[in-house]
Image (cartoon, rainbow, N blue to C red):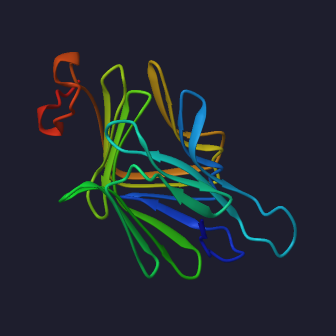
């Protein structure tokens, strides 16, 4: 296990083009927080990052528990260079790229994830894409969430943004529907607009 050092100030988390600050849980799927930020346990302690990240097959690739990360031995390759972690499913197939930037920013540069049938895909400076089990598709090239309990709350038949107060700023977002025939694997270029 290796700890993340994000300092004693509320961290900013960037998931592709989604920027979250002072958000308790960035993403909830079926009531389960898969990425959260907890307040310090006492004065002088750091904020605590917790995450459960999977690959497109739904297999755990990285778990973060109170700023310490653990990776599965089933990963084909895990590369750590400086403050950057890259996890590959196989040669040329990157599942996750994560880096920390001093003093208090954590950036998910790249993620290809499936959890409970929900697909999350992001690249730094490219649209964040979420596809729910029921076919709802959220695509955003710029979204900022602050002061909310939950950033993205994904349930069986709903997808909510900015739950529990706070502020959501969206400069470009599209919500659409994808038929079950095209849902898995998810070819985003075949999305139907509502």
Q: Position of residue 142 (x, y in %)?
A: 35, 56
Q: Position of residue 76 (x, y in %)?
A: 31, 55
Left or right: where does residue 164 sit relative to residue 151? Answer: right
Which residue corresponds to the image point at 46% horizontal and 23% vertical from the top-left?
158
Number of numbered discs visible in the structure rendering:
0
Which residue corresponds to the image point at 23% horizontal and 17% vertical from the top-left?
180
From what the image shows, is residue 42 above or below residue 168?
below
User: Hey, which quadrant is residue 82 in on the image?
Assistant: bottom left
| Residue situated in front as seen by the camera: 151 or 83 | 83
Left or right: where does residue 12 sit relative to residue 194? Answer: right
From what the image shows, is residue 110 above or below residue 166?
below
User: Hey, which quadrant is residue 137 in on the image?
Assistant: top left
Q: Position of residue 104 (x, y in %)?
A: 59, 75
Dividing the image into 4 quarters, which one contains the C terminus? top left
Dividing the image into 4 quarters, which one contains the N terminus? bottom right
Q: Residue furthest left?
A: 190
Which residue corresponds to the image point at 38% horizontal and 27% vertical from the top-left?
117
Q: Position of residue 100 (x, y in %)?
A: 49, 73
């Amino acid at each position: 296990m290796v700890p993340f050092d994000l300092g004693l100030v509320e961290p900013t988390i960037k998931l592709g083009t989604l920027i979250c600050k002072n958000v308790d849980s960035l993403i909830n799927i079926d009531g389960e927080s898969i990425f959260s930020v907890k307040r310090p346990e006492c004065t002088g302690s750091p904020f605590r990052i917790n995450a459960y990240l999977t690959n497109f097959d739904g297999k755990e690739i990285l778990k973060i528990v109170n700023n310490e990360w653990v990776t599965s031995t089933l990963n084909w390759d895990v590369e750590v260079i400086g403050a950057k972690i890259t996890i590959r499913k196989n040669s040329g197939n990157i599942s996750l790229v994560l880096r920390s930037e001093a003093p208090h920013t954590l950036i998910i540069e790249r993620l290809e994830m499936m959890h409970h049938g929900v697909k999350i895909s992001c690249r730094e400076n490219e649209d964040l894409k979420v596809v729910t089990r029921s076919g709802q598709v959220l695509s955003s090239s710029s979204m900022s969430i602050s002061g909310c309990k939950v950033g993205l709350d994904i349930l069986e038949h709903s997808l909510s943004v900015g739950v529990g107060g706070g502020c959501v700023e969206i400069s470009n977002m599209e919500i659409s529907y994808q038929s079950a025939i095209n849902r898995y694997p998810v070819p985003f270029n075949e999305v139907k607009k509502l």
